[in-house]
Image: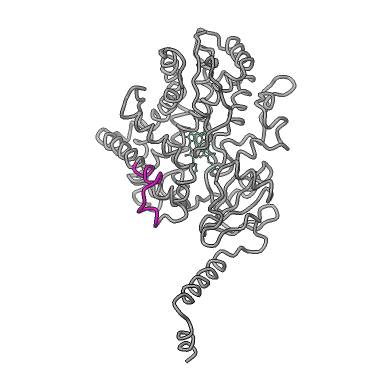
Amino acid sequence: MFLNLLYDSFDFKSWIILFFLFLLLADIIKNRSPSNYPPGPWPLPFLGTVFTKMDFRSMNKLAEVYGNIFSLRVGSEKMVVVSGYKMVKEALVTHLDSFVERPHVPLFHKIYKGIGLTMSNGYRWRTHRKFGGLHLRLFGEEKKILENNIQQESVYLCDAFKAEKGPFNPMTILNGSVSNTVACLTFGQRFDYHDEYYQRILRLDNECVQIAGSYRAQLYNVCPWLLDYFPGPHQTMFSNYKEITGFLRGEIIKHKEDWDPLNPRDFIDNYLTEMEKKKSDPEAGFNIEALVISCLDMIEAGTETSASTLRWGLLFMIKYPEIQKKVQEEIDRVIGQSRQSCVADRADMPYTEAVIHEIQRFGDVVPLGFPKSSAKDTKLGEYFIPKGTSITTNLSSVLHDPNEWETPDTFNPGHFLNENGQFWKRDAFLPFSAGKRACLGEQLARQVIFLFFTSLLQRFTFSKCPGEELSLEGELWFTNVPCPYRMCVTSR
Ligand code: HEM
């Protein structure tokens, strides 16, 4: 009777309004925050804080307003952003087991499917991380294979620089050479800088890293079910990854043909052996699909990051020729001109070590780290963060924290030197993040950067092209990369 009355007294428009009010109420109830949840900008109904750009500059501005722990909402996904050394350390180190999961980010899930090294969780991630770490240690540090490969690659790198006629942009050569150090570990071979197919794979991957940081591609995370049917940068990303994983599948097939478990040549061979061993443990997730994604993880996490660091490095050397000169003086004193640099030289080269650390601090290549989520309810600072909340650790705010660095916004190798000119390790130096999810390739990256950087400065002097301005402003991809620049290279 009451329902009939209601039905008769409502016209179509009123029903629409009622339906909308119902959806609005459901949205408010579904997304209501628990007490003591971090503050943040007011979210729009249904969409959340979708108009907030997810880059480190916007995050820094919001931290000034809401403090070092604040919240956002993308669609109905709750997200907390943590800034400054003290709070980031508390999140990653004090609460070691809290923020160790990766959240479900539709843009990445479509590609990584929650398997492999970087985007997996739980037991599957633990077994893959252990396996990946063991491989890097065995082939890298213990057998010295890695150091030899990097030294060999630095010869190709210097030759390629020497072969350039006139000013040039170092991006393609650096990407090729850095990716070869990872390729040696993963596929057991390097690729020529003129190998068109491999260079195309690197270009496609580069484009993906660039697109992944764009606002338009991130909109995909708000309504993937809809945008799957529309063109846009996300579709370019998906088709690029299809081609890249096709290449990786091809490499795996070739490896299977002459795989000898007693003589593993690289990551793929070791993974195939691990697949056999783990046959009775399907939960560990060692299978061909996860191998493809793990190979992608290695190439992707290892190439863009280290190559951009080196590009920043050369740019800073051009901007600050007096620092470049001091590095070259140390190289001449410790290594000389007749032999190649080796990892052991690091201990005798405090100034160069300080310059490389400052390049990483100021270059700030992975400003927001990789996304994480809370594995359990956690009290962070004075706030409550429920299980399942996405967490972004603003590593850029750590590397520029005014409480930790004497001159945070100036390129100053003195940050890493004590009063006796010895290298000074700083706690707030976290470009590789910290805690259980910290970068797996830190040691590899540090060796590549040191050996390439010293080889280049041993053989060349870098300078600005007459009439061309150089900018220290970065371009925001998923990573923070230098704007494209050209340089003049003179043999020493
Ligand atoms: C300068 C170079 C590099 C920088 C700045 C860097 C930085 C990072 C950062 C910030 C993370 C995220 C950590 C987190 O979630 O808290 C990460 C993760 C990772 N990195 Fe690196 N990285 C570099 C080079 C490499 C290299 C050379 C490799 C290996 C080939 C590598 C492999 C990985 C992997 C596998 C992860 C995921 C770890 C996990 O989820 O457990 N990275 N890296």
Provide residue 209's location: percent of width, then percent of height.
Answer: 45, 38
Q: Residue furthest bottom?
A: 1
Q: Is residue 477 above or below residue 371?
A: above
Q: Within the magenta stretch, is there residue 360?
A: no
Q: Of 370 and 50, which appears nearest the observer? A: 50
Q: Is residue 407 left or right of residue 25?
A: right
Start-end of magenta stretch: 225-239
Q: Is residue 25 above or below residue 274?
A: below
- Which residue corresponds to the image point at 56% horizontal and 67% vertical from the top-left? 28
Q: Which residue, as the protein is rendered here, is positioned at the far right?
A: 419
Give the x, y percent position of residue 427: 67, 35
What's the colour scheme?
one colour
Furthest-left residue in this view: 257
Count of marks overlaid on the render: 0
Report which quarter residue 243 is drawn in.
Answer: top left
Residue 482: horizontal and vertical position, in percent? Answer: 53, 29
Magenta stretch prevailing secondary structure: helix
Write the residue at 43% across / 27% down: 175
Q: Which percent across, then down, holds residue 491?
A: 49, 9
Q: Nearer the viewer, residue 471 or 425?
A: 471
The reply to whether the magenta stretch includes residue 228 is: yes
Q: Is residue 280 left or right of residue 104?
A: left
Residue 203 relative to residue 250: left or right: right
Q: Is residue 6 above or below residue 251?
A: below
